[in-house]
Image (spheres, coloured by chain):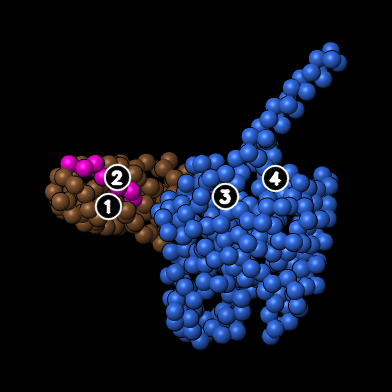
Chain colours: A blue, B brown
């Protein structure tokens, strides 16, 4: 009986290895991501020097099935674009006591923000802190427009960050990690390699050491956030970066940090910098 | 009254006579089934798109009855044979009586 158990275990292990090998071979092959037949997306690039555990960084797109990949190649097929359209309307809608809309200042429209997603989070001199896109949007709302801040993870905010990402697609991610942002970045790096929860998993356990392998029925990606905010088919909605972080840490069976917490802002800066060299791709489509 | 309802259409702008062209349509709509309850236990009233039609130069191409089980933001893709230049007329009928319309012109030469 013992032998038989071991044999079955051995077979299953071999199958799992074979499956993982097949996927790894697929990564970085000739698959090219071109959106709407015009926006060329870099889905694989040399890893930044500070990422010692990786030689090549890959967008989460390369780990997805052909059907999911195809949805992102055409804006008409990409379900996130409905929310982007809603954000465009909101952009021109006056909000708050000053009677101003986003476009009152940003006369060039959302296209003014072409470089935002690629360079955020970044240090904000005025406030003396690292700011995410969400914080920058709320700064405009509260300090210039006299409006209530949007809920970090609410539909309106996710729509707006999706729009800001959509106009920056194709730009190469280049998040600054030195200067005043360095201490926050180091905090993020420490969080990335800290094991959390009953399962004692760090971000790196899955996304650096096991990307391409199966986790249950799904392939682990490198956990890049260049495609965020992203449309997840299982949620049938846009998912924010911090919501994804929270989901990952919850899955390690840990108490998670809050969305918008200093810990997640630091982690976002660090994880974003690990994608330096990939294209902005959000709102991407993932399963 | 459903909010944020926007019809969208993708169709080729030109084709050769007799071509089979592929048409894609999408309308953002909550498609509330009428089966769900809110936090207080009250039924959320049904609010769906119940019919979708496409005509080409007055001739019907497709006429669809939609049921409550169809998910949010209904998407249709279908083919049509075009023999002459003309206009596709798309119409969505909402439970609340609203009618949403969109057109697409195609040049056949």
Residue at image position (73%, 82%) is A128
On screen, residue A28 versus residue B50, left or right, reads right
Residue at image position (51%, 63%) is A169
Marks 4 and 2, Cα distance to the nearest angstrom?
38 Å
Asked whether residue A124 is drawn in magenta, I would say: no
Name the residue tied to disc 4: A211
Callouts 2 and 1 close, C-beta under 8 Å? yes
Q: Give the chain letter at badge 4.
A: A
On screen, residue A112 versus residue A22, left or right, reads left
Name the residue tied to disc 1: B12
Q: Give the chain letter at badge 1.
A: B
Judge the density around disc 3: few (<14), some (14-19), many (≥20) Cα neighbours within 10 Å. many
Asked whether residue B19 is drawn in magenta, I would say: yes
Q: Give the chain letter at badge 3.
A: A
Name the residue tied to disc 3: A61
Magenta residues? B18-25
Judge the density around disc 4: few (<14), some (14-19), many (≥20) Cα neighbours within 10 Å. many
Name the residue nearer the viewer: A65 or A230: A65
**Vertical relation: B13 (above or below) A206:** below
Q: Position of residue A28 (x, y in %)?
A: 60, 46
Callouts 2 and 3 close, C-beta under 8 Å? no
Mark 4 or mark 3: which comes first in sequence? 3
Residue furthest out toward the top: A1
């Amino acid at each position: 009986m013992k032998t038989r158990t071991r044999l079955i275990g051995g077979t299953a292990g071999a199958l799992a290895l074979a499956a993982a090998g097949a996927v790894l071979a697929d990564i970085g092959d000739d698959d090219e991501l071109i959106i709407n037949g015009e926006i060329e997306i870099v889905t694989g690039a040399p890893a930044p020097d500070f990422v010692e555990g990786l030689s090549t960084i890959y967008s989460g797109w390369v780990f997805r099935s052909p059907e999911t990949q195809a949805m992102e190649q055409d804006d008409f097929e990409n379900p996130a674009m409905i929310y982007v359209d809603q954000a465009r309307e909101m952009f021109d809608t006056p909000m708050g006591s000053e009677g101003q809309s986003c476009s009152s200042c940003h006369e060039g429209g959302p296209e003014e923000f072409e470089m935002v997603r690629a360079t955020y989070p970044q240090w904000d001199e005025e406030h003396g802190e690292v700011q995410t896109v969400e914080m920058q949007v709320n700064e405009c709302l509260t300090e210039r427009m006299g409006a209530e801040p949007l809920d970090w993870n609410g539909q309106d905010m996710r729509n707006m960050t999706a729009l800001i990402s959509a106009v920056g697609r194709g730009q190469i991610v280049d998040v600054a990690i030195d200067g005043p942002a360095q201490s926050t970045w180091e905090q993020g790096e420490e969080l990335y390699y800290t094991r959390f929860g009953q399962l004692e998993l760090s971000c790196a356990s899955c996304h650096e050491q096991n990307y391409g392998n199966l986790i249950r029925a799904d392939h682990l990606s490198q956990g890049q956030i260049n495609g965020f905010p992203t449309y997840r088919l299982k949620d049938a909605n846009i998912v924010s970066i911090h919501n994804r972080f929270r989901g990952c840490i919850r899955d390690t069976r840990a108490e998670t940090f809050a969305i918008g917490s200093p810990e997640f802002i630091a982690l976002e800066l660090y994880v974003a910098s690990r994608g330096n060299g990939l294209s902005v791709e959000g709102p991407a489509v993932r399963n | 009254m459903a909010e944020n309802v926007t019809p969208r259409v993708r169709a080729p702008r030109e084709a050769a006579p007799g071509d089979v062209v592929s048409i894609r349509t999408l309308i953002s709509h909550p498609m509330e089934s009428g089966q769900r309850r809110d936090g207080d236990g009250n039924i959320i009233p049904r609010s769906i798109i119940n019919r979708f039609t496409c005509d080409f130069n007055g001739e019907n191409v497709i006429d669809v009855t939609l049921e409550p089980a169809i998910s949010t933001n209904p998407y249709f893709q279908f083919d049509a044979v075009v023999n002459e230049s003309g206009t596709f007329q798309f119409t969505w009928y909402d439970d609340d009586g609203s009618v949403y319309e969109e057109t697409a012109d195609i040049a056949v030469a």
